[in-house]
Structures are given as structure tokens and as C-alpha cells.
Image (cartoon, rainbow, N blue to C red):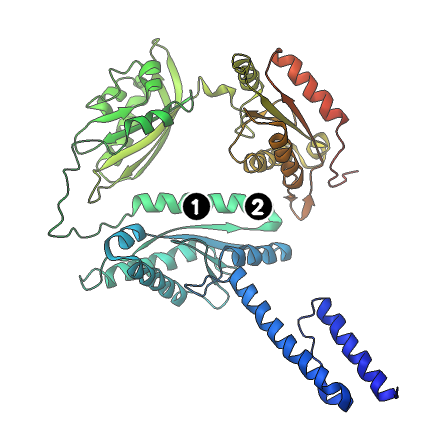
Amino acid sequence: MNESYRLGEQSIIAHLQRLANGASTAELDVSALPAELRAIGEQLQKTYAVLKQERQLLERSAYIDPLTNLGNRGGLDRHVDQLWRKGVPFTCAYIDIDHLKHCNDTFGHAEGNRYILGICRVLTETMKHDDLLFRIGGDEFVLVSPTVDEAELERRLERTRSDLIEATSDGKAPMIASFSFGCSRVDPLAGDTHRQTVMDADRKMYRYKLMHRVQQPKEDNASQRPIADQLPCNDRVFQAISMSSETRYPFILNLDTGESQWSINAVRDFGLPSQHPYNSVDMWLARVHPEDRANVRTELDMVLNGTWHFHYMQYRVMDATGKYVLCDCTGYRLDATDTEPNMYVGIIINRSLADTTDSVTGLGDIHTLVNAIGEMRRVAHEVGFVAIKIDDIAQVNARFGFDAGDRVLAESAACLMECSRGKGRLFRSTGPMFVALFDDLGSEETDAIADEIERFLGSPVLFGSFEYQPPLRVATLHLDAVDRQPVSILNELKALLKEAPQIPGTKLN
């Protein structure tokens, strides 16, 4: 074997090793190979070209939306992760296309796709050079800007939306095009989190949609049934919602007729005349404390006459026993559509009953947990418990302050809610201990959820530029039936946590 042939073989082997290691630029100089190896080299180059094209297609499908050629949700996550690692502040806008379902139902999905592409085009035209736009769902977009602040991005999107509405309101377009949006500024080094950003922008977008709804022109031949003769809510669905919490009372008010719908709990706890009273605003104001009544009436009048669309106040209301209780009252005005009346929709929280909610995490507290376990003694089926303890909270409080410790607990509670997948009831037991109760769940399913909690619960929390990963312990307990007192079960969970291995986090000493 001559030296030239041996060197050629080494070049081919090195090329194959680079391919095996996932190199993105594994070129082979075929002309430098000896004549007897060039055919092999050419075949390898062709194979590499095919593999490279397939990889590009796979990456495109993983990160690119096929309809708009924008980044998809995977692309958004990758871009945000890059900004986060660099510690770069940025503003994100959550954008939701208005009336896409109406477009699909009325004009067909082909027109719906044209509507989406039209919104995509106008949003792209308003972008700065370092902005990126992503389509993360059927009617959802996210715009990320590292340089523009929240107020400037809101002004830009408002101008774009106004121009779009004006351009499609001449009757030539199939429908009036518009979108709703909410903007949020995030600074990773200031301790902001992905979850806080998403929730803030999404909440603002939803509120904007409620306050700036665009009405589509009514078709001449449309035969609509009268919309003001009933409330647009199925009684069974409404009652299912209203019974889901003893402390929360949803309500719906038809502003066109004055009729309202209230939960059974509200009728019981506030002594309302029925679930469907008329003149419900006056009825409710009569129960408001005299010192609070004038302010409440003024704000409600602003909502009812359309000046405001959002209402939030905390005031005192007389309950069925004649005592005044503190309530949080939140409501939205929904302007009429072709199929719905003008409505005022909201929820009232009775703070005299809500004191069993942990103020830091929003989960049920130890009293609620004990009551929940006590209830399980009356039903004869299996129960799964997952107990979680966040270690080193005392050290976090000592080094960074109690607000930092509360942030760790709040973030852990939010992750716990995601990991439980809505299957269980969640509680903050005592201090840094959480308990998830899974009704009628087998031991294998309980263990699977515990494994997921171990993998994802300890998400990092930033204190300035310091990234803290909380250490934690996880333990499970499965019972075929609850046949013991709640205190006995909680003591067993504490003992199991003490024996459970620690999932290590950031060392603070």
C-alpha cells in the first residue's frame, strides 16, 4: 500500500468520524484523493449532501411554521432561551387574531389561511431590524424585540391595528381584519421568569380583546334568533363552574334585559332572591356597605354605560347572616355581537371564606388539606399522595430576604401545578412542604407524576445575577382507602420526606 493511498483512507475515515459526531460542515476534498478512492469519495459527498438536506428539512419542520414561514413555538422557545442565557432584556407581544373562527366558519378555511397570512404580512411590515415574529398557534403570534420598550411596542401595534381595520372596513374585504395584543417587558437579570412574562402578556392581551372588540357587519340575509331573550350560558355548565369553589361566585348580567345569573353558593351566602334576578345591580348595591356604596355605584355605572370595560374593587358586602364581609369583585363588560347581547361577566371572592388559601402560593393551606383528607375517609377508593419539601428556604431567607424565599415557593407551586397535569388537588402543608392529593389514582400513576415532579420542579430562580436552583425531596404514599386521621397521614408523609434522597440544587454555604 503506497503512502498516497494510506493518506486517502485516513481522510475518508476522518470525514466519516466528523459525520458521526454530527458536524454541520463535513466536506471532503475528493480531488486530493488518489484515483482509486475518488469514486468512494464522490459517493460519500453525494450521501452527505442528501443527509444535509434532510437535516435542514427536519430543522425547518421543528422550528418553522409551514403556512407563514415564521418561527413556530419551538423556534420561539429556542430564541427566548438564547436571549435568557445572554441576560438580554426584551419585550414580547402576545398577539391574537380576532374572529378567525368566524372567518373559517363563514368563508371557509382557505379564506381563513389568507386572513392569517394577511395579519402576518402587516405585522412583519411593522417590525424593526432586530425583531422576530413567531406563529405559536392557529390564531396566536408572538413578537419579540430586544430593543423596543413596552410602551413603544404598544403604540406601534396600535397604529398597525388601526390602519388594518380602516383598510378592511370599506366593504371590499370579506370581513374587517383586526387583532388583539398584550405587551410585557422582561429582564432575566432582574429575576423575571418565563412564566411571569407569558402570564402578564397573555392577561393584557385578553383584557385588550374584551375592551376593543371589532364588530363584523351583519349580513342582510342572516336570520338570527333574538339575542336579548336569554343569557348565553348553559345552566348545567354554569352551575358546574359555580360549584367548583366555595369562596368564588361567578355571575352573568344581560345588559340588554337586566336579567342576571348567579351561582347557588351566592344565593345561599348572600341571601339573593333567586339565581335569575332582574335589576341585579340595584339588588347588589343594596347589600354593599353604606360607606362603600357611592364609590361602587360610580364605578359600576362607568362599566354599564360602556365608558369602562374592566372593573375591580374590594369592598364590604352584607352576607345572609347580616354581617359585612370583605369581597374582591372583578368583572368585564362584553360588547354585543351578532349572536350575543351586551353582557357584564365577573366573579366575586368572599375573603371571609378564602382565608384558607395560602397567600404566597395561592394553593390551599394546611386547614384545607386536613379537610380534604378528612373528606376522603368517607369514600372507599384509592388515594395517591405526593409530598414535596423545598430544602434551604431558611438559608435563602437569611441571605436574600423573605421575599426571595416566597418567590422560590411561588415558583415551585406553579411548577407543581404544571406537573400534576390537573389531576390532583394541591396544598402548601407547612413551611416549605407541599402535598398533592390524587383522588382515585393508582400507585404506578402516582409514582409517574412524582418522577415528573423530580425532573421539573426545581426550576432556577434568579436573584439579580445569581441563579438559584432549589434542592428538594419528593416522597409518595399510596392508600387503597383512607382509614386514618389526617394528622397520622401527614406525619407519615413528613417521615417519608426525611428519608427521601435530596435532589441537589445550588449550595448557599
Give, as a three-letter code, the residue at label 2: Asp
Secondary structure found at label 2: loop
Q: Is residue 130 left or right of residue 394?
A: left
Residue 202 marker: 1
| Residue at (88, 88) in percent of width and height | 2
Q: Depth check: give the residue in front, 435 or 356.
A: 435
Q: Depth check: give the residue in front, 320 or 106.
A: 106
Q: Is residue 155 left or right of residue 390?
A: left
| Residue at (29, 32) in percent of width and height | 299
Q: CA distance from mark 2 to mark 1?
A: 16 Å
| Residue at (22, 60) in percent of width and height | 174
Secondary structure found at label 1: helix
Q: Badge 1: how crowded within 10 Å, few (<14), some, or many (20+)? A: many
For the question of whether residue 176 can be seen, the reply is no
Give, as a three-letter code, the residue at label 1: Asp
Which one is closest to the eye, mark 2 or mark 1?
1
Which residue has dot 2 on it? 192
Q: Is residue 255 above or below residue 5?
A: above
